[in-house]
Image (cartoon, rainbow, N blue to C red):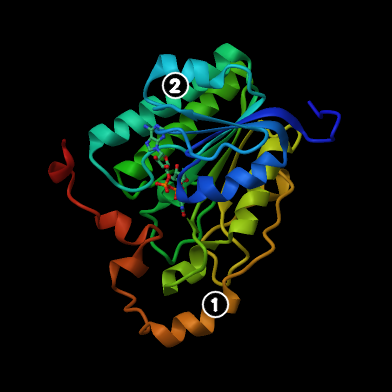
Amino acid sequence: MTDVAGRPFRRLLLTGASGGLGRVLRPYLRGLCDTLRASDLVAPPDAGAGEECIGCDVGDRPAVMDLVRGVDAIAHFGGESVENTFDRILHANLLGTFNVYEAARRHGVKRIVYASSGQVTGFYPTDVVVDPSMPVRPSSLYGVSKAFGENLSRLFFDRYGIETVCLRIAMAFPEPTTHRMLRSYLSYRDLCELVHRGLVAPGVGHAIVYGVSANRDLLWRNPDAARIGWTPRDSSEPFRAGVEARQPVPDPDDVQNRFHGGRFTQDGPFEDRAT
Ligand SMILES: NC(=O)c1ccc[n+]([C@@H]2O[C@H](COP(=O)([O-])OP(=O)(O)OC[C@H]3O[C@@H](n4cnc5c(N)ncnc54)[C@H](O)[C@@H]3O)[C@@H](O)[C@H]2O)c1
């Protein structure tokens, strides 16, 4: 797949390109390909050189079939990124992720990096260190939808040989601002390198990697990180003193601290979110 300029891909697709992480990944991924197809619900503005910006609702199957045509690999970051009504989660995350995989199958795309979430195992208590071999315990409907995407990607690997690296992203933001984030922080640099490895590492088959920097007191073991050749370079430690000075010591019984998923585990009773 390497082109004459030494870039690993001719054309990459990034969904969710206008989102918080999409805006970080867009310039980085542009450097990995001749053409970056950047997509979101509304076409991202300001297409630069070597970019195609396309508006596409991933829940719209015919539109996704067109979106995926001609790409070598996909970074799938579009969809509902927090808890929401079941109908919205159903459309964007379940139907949307199915459409992306089905389009990949029809168009012969063989590698996907899928933005899953640490919320797939969010209902584990924080005194349990979790790894990807353990049963899922989703924190929320959102977490259930991410577990669906992981299982779907497993099926598409076992049946069709489409390789996926599922990223159980913990908390990727410019910097950690709470005690919880000191454990869960994923720096943008580590995120970009993680997506990069997920796209290019040879023979990954189906992998699940927790997206978290090299923080103290980690809640996860991450055997597949080495398998895809990713080692986080950053840590939340430089931010610790600031967070601890600004924030009171957390109550260990507070839901924020009892479960991996923090407040996602309590975020709205389902009956309030039926529509
Ligand atoms: N930021 C984090 O710490 C974090 C943690 C865990 C998982 N993730 C996952 O990473 C991905 C990106 O997260 P983010 O923080 O950038 O979220 P975000 O909400 O900022 O971005 C998501 C993007 O998806 C787009 N989108 C929503 N519904 C869509 C649809 N039906 N069709 C096409 N596009 C649609 C939105 O317009 C938005 O631009 C999400 O899948 C999220 O679940 C993020």
**Residue 176 x/y as whole percent:** 49, 69
Quadrant for residue 31, please give it. Answer: top right
Quadrant for residue 165, please give it. Answer: top right
Label number found at residue 99 = 2
Q: What amino acid type is highlighted by mark number 2?
A: Asn
Q: Is mark 2 within 8 Å of ligand 1?
A: no
Q: CA distance from mark 1 to mark 2?
A: 40 Å
Residue closer to the observer: 27 or 132: 27
Residue drawn at x 63%, y 23% as measured from the top left: 71
Label number found at residue 117 = none
Q: Is mark 1 within 8 Å of ligand 1?
A: no
Q: Would residue 224 be visible to someone looking at this image?
A: no
Relative placement, left or right, of 30 versus 55 is: right
Relative placement, left or right, of 74 versus 5 is: left
Callout 1: few (<14), some (14-19), or many (20+) C-alpha neighbours within 10 Å?
A: some
Residue closer to the observer: 22 or 274: 22
Label number found at residue 239 = 1
Please determine whether, in this image, residue 194 is positioned above or below residue 76. Answer: below
Residue drawn at x 49%, y 83% as measured from the top left: 242
Residue drawn at x 44%, y 67% as measured from the top left: 127
Nearest to N terminus: mark 1 or mark 2? 2
**Residue 58 x/y as whole percent:** 41, 27
